[in-house]
Image (spheres, coloured by chain):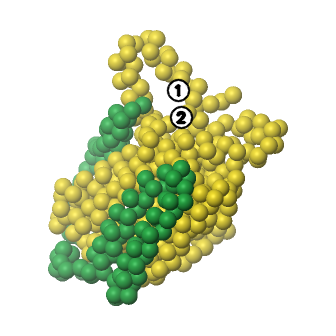
Amino acid sequence: MFSLEGITNFIHEWLNSHLSAIFALLAEFVLVGVAAIGLFAFLGLVLVWMERKVAAVMQLRLGPNRLGPKGIFQTSADTLKLIMKEALTPDNADKLLFNLAPFVVIIVAMLILAPISFAKNFQIWDINIGVLYVTAISSLSVIGVLMAGWSSGNKYSLLGAMRSGAQIVSYELSAGLSILTIIVLTGSLKISDIVASQENGWWIFKGHIPAIIAFVIFIIASTAETNRAPFDLAEAESELTAGFHTEYGGMKFALFFLAEYINIFIVCAIGATLFLGGWMPFHIGHWVAFNHIMDYIPSSFWFFGKTGFLIFLIMWFRWTFPRLRIDQLLNLEWKYLLPISMFNLLLMSVMAIMGWYF
Amino acid sequence: MGAASLLVLIFAGIAFAGGGISIALLFVKGSKNAQKGQPYECGIPSTGSPWNQFNVGYYLFALIFLIFDVELVFMYPWAVVVKKVGIMALVEIVIFFFILFMGFLYAHKKGALKWM
């Protein structure tokens, strides 16, 4: 049966039998780096294509359909175009910060990949504070955005960056609280433990109503954190041209664009891990035969399937809800989501102590 | 893999971003033009620097966020042990939330959460 774990074990054994221990380790480091870069490129190409196709379906049109089957190579052609374009630095920009910002955004997105469990026993680093690590690192990405907006020397950019900063930090609170709601149940921050605790059912089913409320709040908050519509005030194209990356062009713009899609993938992966069981197949209590059939589907398929479903959900939002104003956006967070998620956390801890969950 | 994986990922990020930008540099023949370096605004030469006074509302929200985020960090260790400690943990977090919520109501009453 196809499993990513088998491939990594085979590579590990092959390298250790042919090379000395240090060189085998170095070779593995290089492989991990290349795999991470490959995943980035792959996700960028696929998610942008998926976004355009989903948008097309929602609006009853065809979407990209010229390059390759169903237009799958459209993104590659766009990347090629962006490579050919000049990435100029404006005259009154802060040159160092302006050129550093894309690096910061990409490195932050790269770092969050470390604790994500892509398949059974397929994880870069199973750190014992996994979830805390993810929330900590993902809040660093706002620094890249503020850097880009401030250093551009453009009023639109600065406005976009400030909005984005206010929005990301606000929604981080309710995202954090809804993550905590699940941590109360699992009793561990380690990603592998969280996935293992969902072997007989996912938390969204086992945790009753508080888990469902937490899931909804998490999806809303992560849509806002990734600056997606209806919370795309940071780059509201009808008022701010492109927000914080107005002045960026060519490959530097492409890096921002890519980091945005990678961040969507990451928040959806975290959501899938916490609420929908990560790579764990769909199991129902004591239905042994059903559970065995579900086990036949490789764990990586489950993980990417669930993540893909959440990504589709977030893309769906974009064509359903109108954009919020900044005061409405901050009201929604501070007057509704934050109090609700605080009381939800209390409710969940009562449930966890009383044992009112499966 | 251990903590070394973070270094590997940082280098992968630098390689990815730097590689992309430097490949683009190979292809691009830039032209010189005085208009090119101007900020992209509306066609008319822009007046004034963007780096001047800014709406204080954003900073207010950042300050309130800072308080709540520190509380959130305190709650992570609590959430891990709440099932083991039992009812005592619940009593403690209710007191904690009560104080936090009073602060929240105070900020609300003072109008700190109102966008002007």
Label 1 sits on residue: A8
Q: Chain letter for green, please.
A: B
Chain ID, mark 2: A
Residue A326, position as x, y percentages in the image: 41, 80
| Left/right of residue A300 with respect to residue A96 in the rendered view | right
Relative to A156, does residue A108 appear above or below in the rendering?
above
Disc with the residue nearer the chain's start (2 vs 1): 1
Discs 2 and 1 carry the same chain letter: yes
How packed mark 1 is, by other alpha carbons closer than 10 Å (few <14, some 14-19, many 20 or more), is some
B21 or B86: nearer the viewer: B86
Residue A92 % position (x, y): 17, 67
The residue carrying pointer 2 sits among few (fewer than 14), some (14 to 19) or many (20 or more) residues within 10 Å by Cα, namely: many
Is residue A279 at all visible to an observer of this figure? no
Q: Mark 2 points at which residue?
A: A122
For the residues marked 2 and 1, what is the alpha-carbon distance in whole angstroms? 8 Å
Q: Which of the chains bears the disc numbered 1?
A: A
Q: What residue is rendered at 30% in x and 77% in y?
A: B60
Comparing A73 with A131, the one in front is A131
Instruction: Look at the image and tell me whether residue A190 can be seen.
Output: yes
Element under label 2?
strand
Marks 2,1: beta carbons within 8 A = yes
Amino acid type, mark 2: Phe
Residue for point 38% across, 29% down: A30
The residue shown at (36%, 83%) is: B106
Q: Write down the quadrant of residue A252 in the picture.
A: bottom left
Which image quarter holds the N terminus of chain A?
Answer: top right
Q: Is residue A302 above or below residue A98?
A: above
Residue type at mark 1: give it.
Thr
Using the rendered view, name the quadrant where residue A87 is placed.
bottom left
Please determine whether, in this image, residue B78 is positioned above or below residue B5: below
Give the camera-side residue of B31 and A202: A202
Chain A on-screen colour: yellow
